[in-house]
């Protein structure tokens, strides 16, 4: 049996990855952002940067495959753009506002406006290219 | 342009196993896949992977990736758009990048089939879904249609009935392809209505799904049904249109392979669910991946004028 600890994020169990990911983000260990209803306006809409939000759900299989891609993307893209995720269940206000009917849905914002919407699992290079269009 | 001995397209059990086998033969290997795991990663529980009593598809495929990386396999998270041959070298193109390989292994699996009706593409993710367990909970207290006559459609209807207000289960075959017991169970549910003998002709809605149109096959009448969501559950097919001029496909659009994973194009091998292999199973896909990798190795050795020795009993 494999045991995981919170500060040693597991690479194997997807669900644990998702949960620990959010936990770690709250301590600002990684460059990936955790978006919430509370911080969405300040961190996404009013941000000076191009912002990519991965709207995900904890129960969605493809979201668990998307998770590590977003994490890597956030690290690689650095200060060029703000990359992060939002749990649609925990943040119904924002998810409702953008009418999220499918997860994962990935939206690129700039200056508070939607620039691009992508439905379903996306590759890292595809996301990078899409972000580049608006940087 | 980055140069590889083998480029593997697809990151499910077939592609990942192929990558490990090819790397262990000291080939330079790149795997190109949107995400690692493929359809297998979505399996909630896997109980038939030998040596592992029970695990999730995600965990199993993540372990394969970790193992491949330990051997030195490289990964790119992207989607391949074309493979072309240029005097014995293959150019593998994604939207942004070109890669070069001496051999290619196609292992991109299956994709959910779509209905192929107007407005379906436009409203995918706006009410049209191919994954009931992913998107079902986003339709709480709404009205949805499930389309399909097999077990997966009936199972989706049963699952959704617990979340949504009303489910319509639509099929042409009256669920003939589903287990009778399952169909009876679904029919007995209060908020599921089974309508059959029809063909869906269009998705209705502008910015999101408002309903669907179907043709009643008995009366030949065009009817409309108001729904908030449409779950398409009509099986899977390999997305091979982009490669159809390069390798031969069968009538089901599967890549035709021989016993060792060779396709009709020398230097291109294929493995797993995207091929005409008789069974779409993780263990089988993994074995097919190993075969394709060893065949690619043999092919590359022969090109260099070496004879690849059998993989048993002879020192490498």
Image: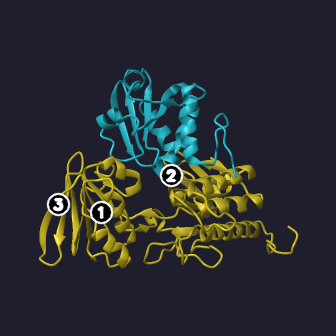
Label the yellow chain with its letter.
B
Which quadrant is the C terminus of chain A positioned in?
top left
**Callout 2: chain:** B
> Of tags 1 and 2, which is closer to the observer?
1
Number of the label disc, if any, that sits on residue B275: none
Label 3 near label 2: C-beta < 8 Å? Answer: no
Question: Which residue is rendered at x = 68% and y = 50% of the image?
Answer: B66
Question: Which residue is rendered at x = 64% and y = 43% of the image?
Answer: A10
Location of residue B314 with respect to B166 vertically, above or below: below
Say whether residue B267 is visible: no
* Image position of B20 (left or right of A16): right
Between A9 and B31, the one nearer to me in the picture: A9
Between A12 and A114, the one nearer to me in the picture: A12
Q: Which residue is mark 3?
A: B225
Query: For the residue carrying disc 2, how many other residues have a C-alpha within 10 Å: few (<14), some (14-19), or many (20+)?
Result: many
Instruction: Please check whether the numbered discs 2 and 3 fall on a single chain.
Output: yes
Say whether residue B255 is visible: yes
What hue does chain A carry in this figure? cyan
Point out residue B169 in the picture as x, y percentages from the top left corner: 27, 66
Question: Which residue is rendered at x = 63% and y = 36% of the image?
Answer: A6
Number of the label disc, if any, that sits on residue B79: 2
Between A96 and B78, the one nearer to me in the picture: A96
Q: Secondary structure at mark 1?
A: strand
Q: Which residue is mark 1?
A: B146
Question: Which residue is rendered at x = 56% and y = 28% of the image?
Answer: A31
């Amino acid at each position: 049996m494999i045991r995981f600890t919170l500060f040693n994020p597991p690479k194997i169990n997807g669900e644990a990855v998702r949960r620990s990911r959010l936990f770690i983000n709250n301590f600002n260990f990684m460059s990936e952002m955790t978006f919430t209803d509370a911080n969405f306006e300040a961190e996404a809409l009013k941000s000076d940067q191009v912002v990519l939000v991965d709207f995900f759900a904890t129960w969605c299989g493809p979201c668990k495959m998307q998770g590590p891609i977003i994490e890597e993307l956030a690290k690689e893209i650095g200060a060029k753009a703000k990359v992060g995720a939002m749990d649609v269940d925990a943040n119904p206000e924002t998810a409702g506002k953008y009418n999220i009917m499918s997860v994962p849905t990935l939206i690129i914002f700039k200056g508070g406006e939607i620039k691009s919407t992508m439905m379903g699992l996306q590759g890292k290079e595809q996301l990078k290219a899409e972000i580049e269009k608006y940087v | 342009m980055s140069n590889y001995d083998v480029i593997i397209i697809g990151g499910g059990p077939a592609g990942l196993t192929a990558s490990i086998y090819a790397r262990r033969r000291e080939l330079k290997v790149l795997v190109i896949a949107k995400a690692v795991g493929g359809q297998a990663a979505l399996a909630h529980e896997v109980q038939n992977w030998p040596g592992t009593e029970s695990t999730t598809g995600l965990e199993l495929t993540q372990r394969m990736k970790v193992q491949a990386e330990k051997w030195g396999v490289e990964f790119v998270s992207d989607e391949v758009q074309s493979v072309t041959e240029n005097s014995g070298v293959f150019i593998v193109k994604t939207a942004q990048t070109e890669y070069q390989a001496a051999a290619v292994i196609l292992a991109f699996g299956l994709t959910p089939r779509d209905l192929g009706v107007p407005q379906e593409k436009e409203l995918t993710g706006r009410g049209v879904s191919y994954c009931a367990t992913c998107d079902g909970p986003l339709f709480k207290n709404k009205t949805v249609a499930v389309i399909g006559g097999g077990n997966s459609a009936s199972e989706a209807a049963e699952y959704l009935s617990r979340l949504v207000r009303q489910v319509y289960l639509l099929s042409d075959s009256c669920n003939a392809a589903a287990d009778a017991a399952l169909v009876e169970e679904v029919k007995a549910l209060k908020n599921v209505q089974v309508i059959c003998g029809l063909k869906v002709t269009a998705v209705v809605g502008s910015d999101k799904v408002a309903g669907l149109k179907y043709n009643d096959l008995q009366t030949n009448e065009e009817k409309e049904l108001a729904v908030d969501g449409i779950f398409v559950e009509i099986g899977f097919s390999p997305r091979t249109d982009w490669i159809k001029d390069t390798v031969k496909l069968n009538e089901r659009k599967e890549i035709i392979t021989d016993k060792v994973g060779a396709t009709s194009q020398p230097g291109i091998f294929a493995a797993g669910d995207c091929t005409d292999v008789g069974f779409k199973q993780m263990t089988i896909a993994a074995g097919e991946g190993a075969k394709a990798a060893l065949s690619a190795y043999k092919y590359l050795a022969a090109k260099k004028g070496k004879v690849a020795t059998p993989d048993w009993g002879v020192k490498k």
